[in-house]
Image: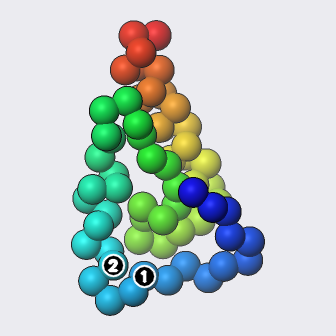
Amino acid sequence: MRRHRRVVPFWAPRGRESLPTLRNPWGPIHLAGDYQLDMPSLADAATSGENAARAVLASLGR
């Protein structure tokens, strides 16, 4: 993964078709980020990260 500074969100044609896959966990791996949303924002990115962290902790039995 890479962090891109000062990037305007953009989805290539048909690029959003991958969102259902990105939203679902892959075993113990949970992805997070505002790219999963319709209108990205910093607050939503933070909430996404918190939700992913909680899911990981729950999968570890904590």
Determine whether the residue tagged by mark 2 lies in a helix, strand or loop. Answer: helix
Residue 40 image offset from top left, x and y in percent: 53, 68
Residue 44 visible in the shown view: no
Residue 51 image offset from top left, x and y in percent: 47, 37
Determine whether the residue tagged by mark 1 lies in a helix, strand or loop. Answer: loop
Residue 33: give its label.
none
Q: Residue at x 42, y 82 (%)?
A: 11
- Name the residue nearer the viewer: 60 or 45: 60
Residue 26 quadrant? top left
Q: Inspect the image, locate mark 1, and give the three-letter code of the amino acid beneath it.
A: Trp
Q: CA distance from mark 2 to mark 1?
A: 5 Å
Is 38 displayed left or right of 42 in the figure?
left
Q: Residues within 10 Å of mark 2 (few under 14, many from 20)?
A: few
How many labels, in total?
A: 2
Q: Extreme right residue here?
A: 5
Q: Residue at x 49, y 49 (%)?
A: 32
Asked if the residue at tag 1 contacts the one at tag 2, i.e. Cβ–Cβ closer than 8 Å, the answer is yes
Residue 31 image offset from top left, x and y in percent: 45, 47
Residue 11: give its label.
1
Question: In which quadrant of the rendered image does the N terminus lie?
Answer: bottom right
Disc 2 designates what residue? 15
Q: Residue at x 48, y 65 (%)?
A: 35
Q: Residue at x 52, y 32 (%)?
A: 53
Q: Residues within 10 Å of mark 1 (few under 14, many from 20)?
A: few
Q: Is residue 45 above or below residue 12?
A: above
Is 3 displayed left or right of 50 in the figure?
right
